[in-house]
Amino acid sequence: MKVIILAGGLGTRISEETSDKPKPMVLIGGKPILWHVMNIYARQGFEDFVVATGYKGDVIANWVSQIEEDWKVTALETGVETKTGGRIKRCIEEFPADSYLITYGDGVGNINLASLIATHKSKSRIATVTAVRPPARFGVLELNDGLVQHFGEKNQADAGWINGGFFVAEHEILKFIEGDETLFETGPLPLLARRNQLAAFLHEGFWQPMDTLREKDLLNSLALEVVPPWLEIS
């Protein structure tokens, strides 16, 4: 099954790192976070990747041409202005198949891909999204009548579920993507949900995006561990 990795955004929320390179090429433990995302899949037997590029896509294409791992990797230029849905559409049209694994190039998690795929097949829906708990944030305040009742990190289990990426989708999802201007998260996904065609795979394990310098530093420190937490697949 081919893995589509969305890697074309501007990365404006971590602009200190992205003036000369796309966000997925920000180094974590000496390697681009894109490599760490790919390694999650490769360690579980999925080594066929298409990386949907856009902003400074030449940086990713150059890196792909020199990659040392024995993976099959294609950097597909999908346009600087193209939205996430449009990037997925271009990848599917370029590489027709029955189904795909899809994720973002800037977040990692110890997702059990076999369990994700099994859930997707058992639900028989067009797409499945991995639901995760939001990562804990420092400085969360719980207030009551003008007084601070709690100061610190919010309990992740109390925060509900959010889109963690790591999707499985059938080729049929193309019907829900109009074109380059389609944002996957506000177009196809809500529409699939309304039509009862979006399943959820609940992931209670490790998951961490890289949206800020603080999160980059956190991932850097975790990458130094003998086995980074996003590779501890249960």
Image: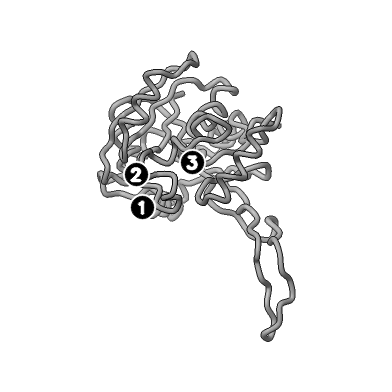
Q: Rate crowding at label 3 as few (under 14), some (14 to 19) or many (20 or more) other CA atoms within 10 Å.
A: many
Helix, strand or loop at label 1? It is loop
Disc 3 or 2, which lies upstream in sequence? 2
Q: Rate crowding at label 1 as few (under 14), some (14 to 19) or many (20 or more) other CA atoms within 10 Å.
A: some
Q: Nearer the viewer, residue 113 or 134?
A: 134
Structural distance between the alpha carbons of marks 1 and 2:
8 Å
Structural distance between the alpha carbons of marks 1 and 3:
21 Å
Residue farthest to the top?
70
The answer to the question of whether label 1 and label 2 lie on touching residues, with beta carbons closer than 8 A, is yes
Amino acid carrying mark 1 in the image: Gly
In the image, what residue occupies the spot 64% across and 30% down?
A: 231
Structural distance between the alpha carbons of marks 3 and 2:
17 Å
In the image, what residue occupies the spot 59% across and 22% down?
A: 43
Task: Look at mark 1 in the image and give the residue it sits on.
Answer: 187
Quadrant of the image for the C terminus?
top right
Amino acid carrying mark 2 in the image: Gly
